[in-house]
Image (spheres, rainbow, N blue to C red):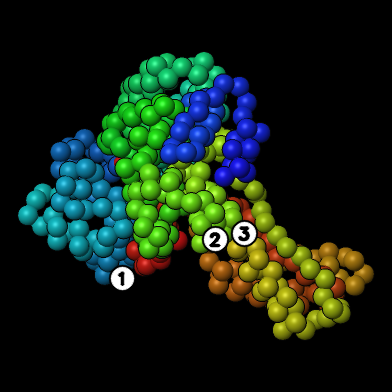
Amino acid sequence: MDYFIKQQASNSIGASTSVSVGEVTVILQDRIVMLVDLDYFFAQCEERRNPSISGKPVVVCVYSGRTEDSGAVSTANYIARKYGVKSGIPISLAKNKLKDVDAVFLPVDKQFYREVSDKIMEILRSHADHFEQMGIDEAYLDVTQRTKGNYHEAEELAETIKGDVLAQQKLTCSIGVGPNKLVAKISADVQKPDGLTSVRPGEVQGFLSPLPVRRLVGVGRKTEKRLETLGVRTVGQLARFDVQKLIEVFGRKLGAYFHNASLGVDEEPVQERSEPESMSRISTLKQDTRDLTVLLNEAYRLCSEVHTKLMRQELVYRSVSIYVVAGDLSVHSRSKTFENPTSSLETFKRTVKELYEKFLAESDAEARRVGVKVSNLSKKEEVQKQLTNFFGSSKD
Ligand code: TTP
Ligand code: MG
């Protein structure tokens, strides 16, 4: 337990509030963080564009094109949700659930949602000391300075933000206010749509304790099951669970994270995200060569490394390049850009192969070093996440 309290102390700047859970006392820095999440975003954009559909169940779909109804639901408005329609379910199932009502099914129009999102993010940014966009419809705002650390002011500011978004962009959102990102995120989910939930430092423990552990970011289905075998179902039970045992089961980093999270402690700053423009790896061959198999052997290894990093940062790429540093140290490169972004390792490797073949056909240089690069990077789109969900991958 010691290391944890020390960590808190060394990170603390300015005012703080201490909170006790059983025998443990933790110090929460007095920050005020908001999480703004737009309600049923894609479907609400569609309602705004065509108000005549508001009042009906609206389902926005990613059609795979294989058969008329194949694909998955991207999101649905709250009327459709009453019938059990939600993100990720097959379109055919959604149609079945809504077969007796006058429902509207629409294809995703990502470009339109992106435009609406950009305008709303500008509004949100203008109300924050520090701003961090998390996805197309979600952002963290650190408002500590402008509210002078006063929750009452922060709650008023949240109302102002909701009013501005509605007046300027005709959309509703839900806001969670809390002492950090973790609490703000969970509280934003409490009341939806059009909600505002504020959890002050002294209320954190009471707020989190009864919640299922699954509500904590990073606790997926597998972790939930493992915690259950330890007799831990709620965040409160997790807070009282021996941290050393947690570390034994989940490793030091994750164990400590779960422990801190259960206590409502999260020091992650709200900070602007800048996406890298490219990612690359280069390596020196054992000997200079023009042998495609040897080149690819090394290049594929580099592709996997780059791809792992790409996945960790949830990025997709649109361009692939290869590099060859020849024996005379001249540098050669070949590139290819796709129309649509992808996260596929297979496409990456296939393109690298094509480009090395092209290089060998066009140049007679011998390769001393080989490199691969992905560029034109952007955040992985929710649509792609959704398709992955649909075709089955677990959260952990
Ligand atoms: P969410 O904020 O998770 O969902 P939402 O805005 O539709 O609904 P809520 O009122 O609960 O916030 O996701 C934002 C958008 O991302 C959503 O409108 C559509 C898209 N999305 C998918 O395409 N697939 C998914 O599985 C999820 C969860 C979201
Ligand atoms: Mg949302």
Residue farthest toward the left in the current orientation of the protein: 100
Q: Which of pointers 3 and 2 lies earlier in the amino acid sequence?
A: 2
**Residue in front for this viewpoint, 109 or 223:** 223
Specify the quadrant of the image occupied by residue 293.
Answer: bottom right
Label 1: how many residues lie within 10 Å, few (<14), some (14-19) or many (20+)? few
**Residue in front for this viewpoint, 31 or 296:** 31
Residue farthest toward the front in the current orientation of the protein: 23
Q: Could you say whether the residue bearing mark 2 is in a helix, strand or loop?
A: helix
Q: Is residue 151 above or below residue 216?
A: above
Q: Which of pointers 3 and 1 lies earlier in the amino acid sequence?
A: 1
Rounded to the nearest angstrom, the CA distance separating label 2 from label 1 is 47 Å
Residue at the image point whose x is 21% and y is 64% from the top? 92
Per the image, the residue denoted by label 2 is: 248
Q: Is residue 233 above or below residue 5?
A: below
Q: Amino acid at mark 3?
A: Lys
Query: Disc 2 or disc 1, which is closer to the eye?
Result: 2
Q: Is residue 110 above or below residue 184?
A: below
- Asked if disc 2 and disc 1 are in contact, CB closer than 8 Å, the reply is no
* Quadrant of the frame with the N terminus: top right
Rounded to the nearest angstrom, the CA distance separating label 3 from label 1 is 32 Å
Per the image, the residue denoted by label 1 is: 66
**Residue in front for this viewpoint, 113 or 193:** 193
Image disc number at residue 309: 3
Residue 110: percent from left, percent from top: 39, 48
Decide if residue 133 is in sight here: no
Determine whether, in the image, residue 355 is placed left or right of residue 393. right
Decide if residue 16 is in sight here: yes
Q: Amino acid at mark 2?
A: Glu
Label 3: how many residues lie within 10 Å, few (<14), some (14-19) or many (20+)? few
**Disc 3, ligand 1: is the CB inside 8 Å?**
no
Residue 217: percent from left, percent from top: 44, 48
